[in-house]
Image (spheres, grey):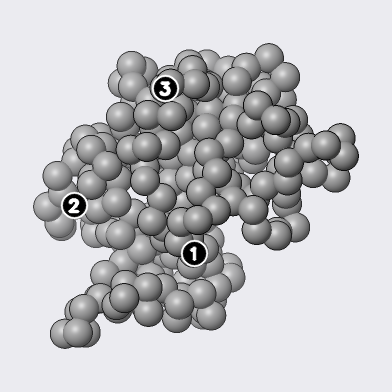
Amino acid sequence: MEGFILAAGLGTRLRPLTDTRPKALVEIQEGQGGEKVTLLEVAIRRLEAAGVEHIVINVHHFADMVVDFVRQRHWQAAIDISDERALLMDTGGGLKKAAPLFSGRENVLVHNVDILSDIDLLDVEQWHRTQGNLVTLCTSRRSTRRMLAFDDDLRLTGRRENAAPSAHAMAFSGISVVSPGLFALLPESERPYPVIDEYIRLAASHPVRCYEHSTDRWLDVGKPETLEKAKQWILS
């Protein structure tokens, strides 16, 4: 299994911290000694713990800082950079741009840099393979403004507002597993585009399913108030 960390975002919700650094390098406290660890390091270590041996990280906002951070530390996994300095490509365009950096033979674990969770990533990938999915989306039964809808077979059917009354509403958790065949199905584009819209399109003819993790701890560290929760998470 390979990994892709989405780390190129502007981090506007974490301003003013992200006025001087990328969101990926925002620090959270670890341990009683007060040493610091970045969101990017947490994400890399999580993927390494799941057995990922090759990770691609996309960069845009303060890209040089992310590249320097990666190069100055020792990692178990080999790490490549997908450079979006010229244009921030959003989640779909970013995944398509990074495609040539992957082997094309292994599933790819896609992980937002600002997500903390106790989700069993190995179990997600194993379920993905067992089901023969093109895409597996980690989801939970929490309320958000952008709910997705799934049928009884856990297949994605669209967004909740456009779904049948019998659909199961779930929130995407910023972690997914994609099969290597996905890359050829994503559109070529010089403009950024979101990946969820493409998953909805592809779900009409390919198995795009959810992996529910509602009983696992999960935190989106995208705002100052959740950053404080993240510090407590690391200490717990």
* Sequence-earlier tag: 2 or 3: 2
The three-letter amino acid code for the residue at tag 3 is Arg
Reply above or below: 157 against 29: above
CA separation in Å, label 1 and label 2? 27 Å
Q: Secondary structure at mark 2?
A: helix
Is residue 54 visible to the viewer in this orientation of the structure? Answer: yes
Q: Nearer the viewer, residue 189 or 119?
A: 119
Residue drawn at 36 percent across, 63 percent down: 39
Reply above or below: 102 against 74: above
Residue drawn at 59 percent across, 30 percent down: 209
Q: Which quarter of the figure is the N terminus placed in?
A: top left
The label number, if any, that marks residue 219 in the structure image:
1
- The residue lying furthest to the bottom in this view is 33
Residue at image mark 3: 129
The three-letter amino acid code for the residue at tag 1 is Leu
Residue at image mark 2: 71
Q: Nearer the viewer, residue 137 or 183?
A: 137
- Tell me the crowding category of disc 1: few under 14, some 14 to 19, or many 20 or more residues within 10 angstroms, Cα based: some
- Tell me the crowding category of disc 2: few under 14, some 14 to 19, or many 20 or more residues within 10 angstroms, Cα based: few
